[in-house]
Amino acid sequence: MALVRARSNGILADTAALPPVVSTTMAYDIQARVVAAAGPIGGYKTGRASPGEPLIAAPIFAKEIRDSDAIIPFEGSRLRGFELEVGFRVDTPLPRTGGTDIAEKLALTVTPVAVIEIVESRLVDPLGCGALWKLADNQINGGLVVGASGKVGTELWADLRLDDATLVSGGVTNPAGRPWEVLQEFLTLAESLSLDLSVGQLVITGSLTGLRYAEAGQKLVGEIAGLGRVCCHFEAE
């Protein structure tokens, strides 16, 4: 399969020469086949472009999850996209949805963390290929950098700096919704897709800063009020 080959040999998949992805079911099936070849999974990303849309789910490979201050290798970095997000680390087995006091139970099982999502793609034209191909390509996830943990409220404040340039400073919002609410909704989606959300895995809930891009050699520092700092360096050529 083209996306499996792209991960093994680095040759990008040209969607114009491939059968179309025609449904979310087909996209999730492609994800599952890639996971079978390239796993294991270290977490999931979710989100949506606007509140009225359904959430999506995409796996994040364990080998692509790094601690803060990580160096993102030059090799394999084509887009160098990034987003600052609120993530949740699963500390104890998650509650089943549909029961009572789910929000309170959920708060006892996860820890909020500041994260930088690295955006990369195995597709020739990731921004022009359509939403379903992006979803099939793990929603163009290229990894995750995990920073400080703490508490996150309903109002979010963040700073994001790339080298000496301030990209964001002040109040921020997530188009998908408030992080705790997104997480709770994602659990329902995960159950419907039979996803295995295990202790130690992470769930990231959508961009607070929009998709932006770095150059090789640049340093990225983000901070979310109540959580703290997360940082990474894009390796120079």
Image (cartoon, grey):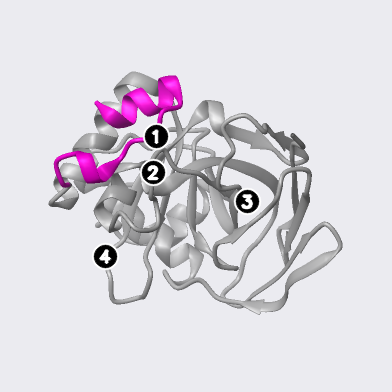
Q: Earlier in the sequence, mark 4 or mark 1?
A: 1
At 21% from the left and 40% from the top, the residue drawn is: 17
Cα distance, mark 2 to mark 3? Answer: 24 Å
Q: Are marks 4 and 1 in contact (CB under 8 Å)?
A: no
Cα distance, mark 4 to mark 1? Answer: 28 Å
Taking the image as shown, residue 69 lies to the left or right of residue 192, namely right
Q: Which residues are magenta?
A: 1-20
Q: Which residue is label 4 attached to? A: 54
Q: Are marks 2 and 1 in contact (CB under 8 Å)?
A: yes
- Camera-near label (3 vs 1) is 1
Q: Which residue is label 2 attached to? A: 124
Residue type (three-letter) at the residue carrying disc 3 = Ile
Label 3 secondary element: strand
Q: Position of residue 24 (x, y in %)?
A: 19, 51
Q: Position of residue 6 (x, y in %)?
A: 38, 28
Q: Earlier in the sequence, mark 4 or mark 3?
A: 4
Nearer-the-camera pick, 182 or 59: 59
Label 2 Cα neighbours within 10 Å, binned few <14 / some 14-19 / many ≥20:
some
Q: Which residue is label 1 attached to? A: 12
Label 4 Cα neighbours within 10 Å, binned few <14 / some 14-19 / many ≥20:
some
Cα distance, mark 4 to mark 3? Answer: 23 Å
Q: Is residue 81 above or below residue 67?
A: below
Q: Quadrant of residue 127?
A: bottom left
